[in-house]
Amino acid sequence: MKITKEARRFARELFTLSLTNGRLDAGKVSGLSDQLVAEKPRGYGAILREYARLVRLELERRHATIESAVALDDAHTASLRNELSMRFGDDLTIEFRTNPGLLGGLRIQVGSDVWDGTVFNRLHLLSQQL
């Protein structure tokens, strides 16, 4: 379903109002969503979907997933936490996963950014070049 420019603009305004010091405020998100549903302005369904999409993208931007072939020890996890916190801020949530299919190395994803230094990825790139 296509969204109108007015609905997209209104959703962006709501999203801007949801921020406190540049960070998403869950209380404001809930309050603004409830107010939007209660008032039901024209096209509120499209506005609400776009607003939810903007909030979801912001939450994904504040979440990191780190995959490795084997479980990382405490020193490595602490080092990775410190590096990512320095780069992306203290409110970043970090999830560690073990994926034996990677063969070795790390794959780090923060939002839509991906850093893939795994053996699997290097072998895949090498096979594409041949």
Image (tube, rainbow, N blue to C red):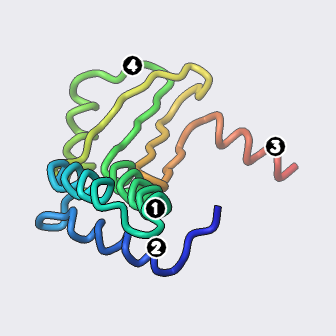
* Image vertical order of residue 44 relative to residue 106, above or below: below
3D distance between C-alphas at marks 1 and 4: 38 Å
Query: Circle 2 is placed at which residue position?
Result: 8
Secondary structure of residue under mark 1 = helix
Q: Is residue 113 above or below residue 11?
A: above
Q: Nearer the viewer, mark 1 or mark 4?
A: 1
Q: Nearer the viewer, mark 3 or mark 4?
A: 4
Q: Which amino acid lies under the numbered mark 4 shown in the image of this protein?
A: Ala
Residue named by callout 4: 71
Q: Nearer the viewer, residue 50 or 76?
A: 50
In the image, taking residue 35 as reference, residue 3 lies left or right, namely right
Q: Please name which of the two marks, 3 or 1, marks the residue nearer to the observer.
A: 1
Distance Cα–Cα, label 3 vs label 2 = 43 Å
Spatial CA span between label 2 and label 4: 43 Å
Q: Quadrant of the N terminus?
A: bottom right
Using the numbered discs, state the Cα–Cα distance from disc 3 to disc 4 in whole angstroms: 27 Å
- The residue to which callout 1 is attached is 50
Looking at the picture, how far across and down is residue 10, in whole percent? 37, 74
Secondary structure beneath label 3:
helix
Residue at the (39%, 49%) spot, across then down: 60
At 73% across and 47% down in the image, what residue appears? Answer: 125
- Tell me whether the residue at label 1 lies in contact with that at label 2, contact meaning CB atoms closer than 8 angstroms: yes
Of the two numbered discs 3 and 1 on the same chain, state the one appearing first in sequence.
1
* Mark nearer the N terminus (3 vs 4): 4
In-image side of 53 versus 91 (left or right): right
Regarding mark 2 in the picture, which secondary structure is present there? helix
